[in-house]
Image (cartoon, rainbow, N blue to C red):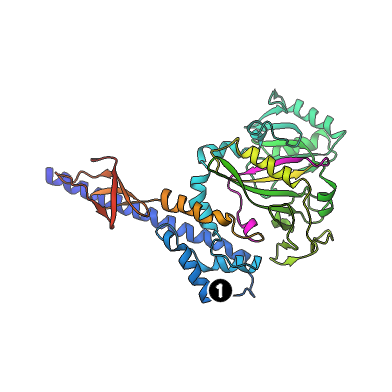
């Protein structure tokens, strides 16, 4: 009987080891597939990397190879878009599968990302005027007091007498489902509300600063600012202005708009990038951007982002969409906890700049590990050490090894299963 039990244990353990190995393969496959997303920013006539540039990339990323080995394509693509070679560009898969896991606590992110709660999370930060909201199908007024559907309709109809309103679904990206109404009857509002059964915001349409309006009058052209919480201080990493396409109401890039790179002093680069990956000196609205432009109230925009970031310290990396109102005051539109870093890297260079190595050392060398297993142990393998998290108990006298894969075993969490 004992022999039979041991055989069953070993068979089960063998299956466990295979499953753990397969999960690791799936992870690496997912990372590789995501890295290919950078390809959509390439062009047929892109200049190829030189052998010297490839060697520089290899040298920079060598110490991170346990966790991640990048593809040369990413660096070639961003070099061609910005005109500057740099081994510190971050591929898409690295951000979404490595950094995001550590920088944005998923247990907080789901709640924080809900547009309907943005006013509560950042309650001292200026935001668009709320008319009504819907959370889990329940209607609330601007102060989160419960109201009926009929009351919500009446409030919206009353507000439409004096201003345009915008209906925004929560949980969608890229401006999907956003509707602007300058006039509507009760029936039309009911139709729009039915389209969004659970999470919805209704706000007064924002009137933007004259300068921002000139970039494209049909959209609220927002400043995308990305900040990083580093050692209890918020650091500005990068900024762009998202300029919408003529006649389109949302400033999302994929709808034919442009992105205008902004230096940290608030001055623009002498070109914008359109959806065809072309550098242009004239926006679709006809505004000339070939010379430096100073973004109005940029210092206030950065100040707002930093102040807001300190209210959600669980999120280490946040991309903020901030509008500039008629009075020059910044207005928070949205907080993105998994914001696209490509938007910055296409125009202003590596997202983390001089902090890149520090960030990668922290998250790829110190924090990243792979769950691995053999017939005796399940363990976390880091870049420079191993932590045993489970011993199988298949041996009578379990001996803890000093090394696994030539890496010292520094911790044993459980000696027997």
> In the rendered view of the protein, which quadrant contains the N terminus?
top left
Q: Name the residue under label 1.
A: 49
Left or right of 405, for residue 128: right
- Residue 220 screen position, x and y as percent: 78, 47
Please tell me how crowded label 1 is: few (under 14), some (14-19), or many (20+) other residues with Cα within 10 Å.
some
Decide whether residue 339 is among the magenta residues: yes
Residue shown at 52%/61% (left/top)? 35
Label total for image: 1
Q: Is residue 385 left or right of residue 97?
A: left
Question: Quadrant location of residue 330?
Answer: top right
Element under label 1?
A: loop
Q: Does the magenta stretch include residue 392?
A: no
Kindly tell me whether residue 20 is visible in this rendering: yes
Quadrant holding the C terminus:
top left
Say left or right for 383 vs 397.
right
Q: Where in the figure is residue 31, as x and y percent of width and height?
A: 48, 58
Q: In which quarter of the image is residue 119?
A: top right
Name the outermost residue toward the right: 161
Q: Residue 283 placed where, x, y %?
A: 80, 60
Residue 389, visible in the rendered structure:
no
In front here: 331 or 187? 331
- Highlighted magenta segment, given as a residue range: 326-346
Q: Where is residue 2 in the image (x, y as percent from the top left)?
A: 12, 43
User: 3 above or below 28?
Assistant: above
Q: In this view, does 7 lie above or below 349?
A: above
- In the rendered image of this protein, does residue 385 appear above or below residue 315? below
């Amino acid at each position: 009987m004992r022999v039979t039990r041991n055989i069953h244990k070993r068979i089960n353990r063998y299956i466990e080891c295979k499953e753990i190995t397969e999960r690791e393969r799936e992870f690496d496959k997912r990372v590789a597939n995501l890295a290919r997303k950078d390809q959509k920013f390439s062009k047929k006539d892109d200049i190829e990397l030189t052998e010297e540039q490839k060697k520089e990339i290899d040298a920079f990323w060598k110490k991170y190879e346990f966790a991640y080995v990048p593809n040369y394509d990413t660096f070639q693509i961003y070099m061609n878009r910005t005109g500057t070679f740099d081994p510190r560009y971050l591929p898409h898969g690295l951000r979404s599968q490595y950094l995001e896991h550590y920088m944005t606590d998923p247990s907080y992110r789901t709640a924080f990302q809900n547009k309907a709660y943005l006013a509560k999370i950042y309650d001292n930060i200026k935001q668009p005027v709320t008319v009504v909201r819907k959370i889990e199908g329940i209607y609330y007024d601007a102060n989160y007091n419960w109201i009926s559907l009929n009351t919500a309709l009446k409030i919206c109809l009353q507000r439409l007498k004096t201003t345009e309103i915008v209906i925004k679904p929560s949980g969608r990206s890229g401006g999907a489902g956003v509707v602007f109404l300058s006039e509507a009857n009760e029936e039309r509002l009911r139709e729009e509300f039915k389209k969004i059964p659970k999470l919805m915001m209704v706000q007064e349409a924002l009137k933007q600063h004259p300068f921002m309006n000139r970039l494209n009058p049909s959209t609220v052209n927002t400043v995308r600012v990305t900040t990083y919480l580093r050692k209890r201080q918020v650091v500005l990493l990068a900024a762009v202005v998202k300029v919408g396409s003529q006649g389109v109401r949302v400033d999302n890039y994929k709808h034919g708009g442009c992105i205008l790179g902004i230096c940290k002093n608030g001055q623009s680069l002498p070109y914008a990038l359109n959806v065809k990956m072309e550098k242009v000196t004239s926006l679709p609205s006809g505004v000339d951007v070939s010379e430096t432009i100073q973004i109005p109230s940029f210092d206030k925009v950065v100040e707002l982002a930093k102040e807001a970031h300190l209210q959600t310290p669980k999120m280490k990396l946040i991309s903020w969409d901030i509008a500039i109102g008629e009075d020059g005051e910044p207005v928070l539109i949205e907080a993105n906890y998994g914001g696209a870093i490509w938007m910055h890297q296409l125009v202003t260079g590596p997202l983390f700049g001089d902090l890149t190595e520090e960030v990668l050392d922290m998250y790829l060398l110190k924090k990243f590990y792979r769950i691995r297993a053999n017939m005796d142990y399940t363990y976390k393998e880091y870049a420079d050490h191993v932590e045993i998290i489970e011993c199988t108990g298949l041996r009578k006298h379990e001996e803890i090894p000093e090394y696994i894969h030539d890496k010292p075993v520094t911790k044993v969490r459980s000696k027997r299963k």
